[in-house]
Image (tube, grey):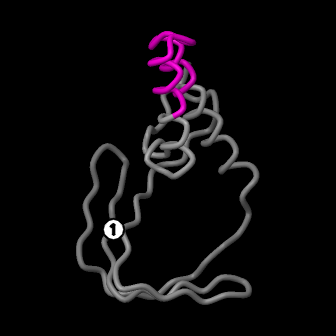
Amino acid sequence: MAQYYEHYRKSSIGLALIDSLDELIQSGHINPQLAMRVLAQFDTSIAEALSTRVRNRANFKAHLDNYRSLDDVWTFVLSNPTFRFEQDTVKADKVKIVACKARVPGEA
């Protein structure tokens, strides 16, 4: 099975899944090994869904405060970004973007 990034586990849907799995483990409905298999499937499914179903684009302009790369994962810290979507514009004080090399599902 191909390895997928685990950073989507820190998204709101990933954290909700982890909380639910913890409750199921604590109540004795599932064992920790099954919870880990569910999380691994979540990693695979979210990567596949984002790569095949999301087609929206955004442009942005900002001041780059900091950046780094480690194991094909880039982290950018931006200040005063302005994001332009098809119909909306969003501004913020500070944003952290984590970008990774796209992996085709099933690719090692």
Give neighbour class at mark 1: few <14, some 14-19, many 20+ (Cα, 10 Å). some
Which is the main secondary structure of the residues drawn in magenta? helix
- Residue at position x 37%, y 47% in the image: 72
- Relative to the observer, which residue lies in front, 108 or 88? 88
- Segment tinted magenta in the rendering: 20-39
What is the residue that sits farthest to the front in this orientation? 27
For residue 67, above or below residue 74: below
Q: Position of residue 33 (x, y in %)?
A: 47, 11
Identify residue type, mark 1. Answer: Phe
- Relative to the observer, which residue lies in front, 48 or 27? 27
Q: Position of residue 28 (x, y in %)?
A: 50, 11
Residue 107 is drawn in which quadrant?
Answer: top right
Q: Secondary structure at mark 1?
A: strand
Q: Position of residue 27 (x, y in %)?
A: 50, 16
Q: Which residue is mark 1?
A: 76
Relative to 46, is 5 on the left or the right?
A: left
Magenta stretch holds residue 56: no
- Relative to the observer, which residue lies in front, 1 or 42? 42
